[in-house]
Amino acid sequence: MLYNQFTSSLSKNLSKLGKSQVQLSSGKRLTKPSDDVIAARGAMAYKVSINEIKQFNRNIDEGLSMLGLTEIQLSASLNILNRARELAVAESNDTATAETREMTSYEMQNLFSELISIGNTKLKNRYIFSGYLSSSQAFNASGVYQGDTNNLEVYISDGIKTGINITGDTAFTDSTKQLSSVLGGTAGMGTLRITSGSGNPVTLPIKDTLTNASPQEVRDAINAPMSGLYNAADTIGTGTLTLTAGTGSPVTLTVDAANNTPALLRDAVNALDMGIEARLATDTVTNEVRLFFRPTTAGETFEIEVSGDGDGEDTDSNGLSALLHTGLQSNLTTTALGIEAFVINDTAGKRLLFAPTTPNTSYTIEVDEDGNSSFSDAGDTDTSGLSRIASGNLTGSINFFMIIDHMKNSLSSNDTAGIQGSIFLLDGALDSNINTTADVGSRLKYLLDQKDRLEDNEISYIENLSILEDADIAEVALEITKIESTLEAMRISSLKSLSQSLFDFLA
């Protein structure tokens, strides 16, 4: 009995000693679930949460790398666009020559190639602007986007994921403008109906004859300065017009009873055949008309001045002075359609680009190509002729490569209007780049803030896990000392008690 009691006590104390020594060496109070089932369950939950946070942080680090590199490349592309704009401003003035523009076109080609290189940036052997198609280049040598529109997303918290990339069709595109199909050398004949914002539709004849109109002619018709409104049947007063086209000599036209309606004055101006054409733009709701003028030679400048209209004012909104629009100086300088048109001449061919004169204003462009006064029949919705510039055939963006290519071609062909248009296009590209960079910056800040929150949560979970799982080292050391003292006492007492015989108990 004494032996059994001794061995049982020895086993228990040795077990306690072994457990305490394990706690001392590992620093953990819980070494297996049976040590404390409730605490072990809580500790396991904390460990799962901590592991999730570690994975979320790895995802965030991936996003920070992707967006950080994207931000750097957007900054590099901004520098290219700024340089292109500097060149456009320098070569659009009168001091530039065909030779300087030709030399500048070579630099534009280098800027184009550099922009392609930026668009095809790689991270960990993946193209960062290609969307899901990250193993393929985002842009080919012509600047055509080859990726997709998918955003790469990662989970950064339970049930919350965020995009960590910008696709190339967004990063290198100005989506505020619309672009027609390729027009080649001609745009076709017919009538445009343009509606801007909440205004009335205005019909605009592109060509009065059955010959095709060039993209430049369509551009000049849309951008043409327009007079104030006239009632189509009323007289517009009398006086004198002085018309000057380009560097030509001024031509005087007397307006009298023979040509004092909008239609008659149009015909009189066109009969001069002096480099300026006149047309009528009709408000389809009020039936009021505006006279608009365009140069016979596409892109050429011109002037129209009014004198002697009989009311003592040559810049008001009455009589013949309404040609010059209300409150403007004595030279016709304004449009009234609400949109501007530009000819884009890149490697794909010539296209028309449209933008609202008031930012963020919606507009529609419809076509009556077959001359039947209908803007919605099958002949007006195909992809040939003038229909190529109708709203149904417009794409809602122009990429930066197309702008740079257009400017290069305008420089090499000494196209002043094209170079000047490049400034407007580059301004839009710069705004788009800044907006995209701001988007990337906000995503980076969001990820960094989320990373800080996760790190705070991780620290809290680790502290709570330590309370459940970690051993009190001082207490464990004291417990080991107590157990060792108990074992020593057992050893001494066992030497005495277990050495006795039956006769010692019987004595």
Image (cartoon, rainbow, N blue to C red):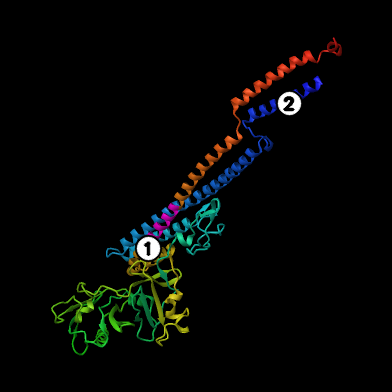
On-image quarter of the C terminus:
top right
Q: Position of residue 77 (x, y in %)?
A: 42, 56
Question: Please, what secondary structure does the residue beneath circle 1 have?
Answer: helix
Q: Position of residue 82 (x, y in %)?
A: 36, 57
Q: Quadrant of residue 81?
A: bottom left
**165 or 189: nearer the eye?**
165
Q: Main secondary structure of the magenta part?
A: helix
Residue 144 visible in the picture = yes
Q: Residue at x 33, y 82 (%)?
A: 285
Q: Position of residue 497 (x, y in %)?
A: 79, 14
Residue 183 visible in the picture = no
Looking at marks 1 and 2 on the same chain, the residue that comes earlier in the sequence is marked by 2
Q: Is residue 435 magenta?
A: yes
Which residue is under mark 2? 12
Amino acid bearing label 2 = Lys
> Relative to 278, does residue 461 appear above or below in the rendering?
above
* Badge 1 density bin: few <14, some 14–19, many ≥20, Cα 10 Å: many
The magenta region covers: 428-442
Which residue is under mark 1? 428
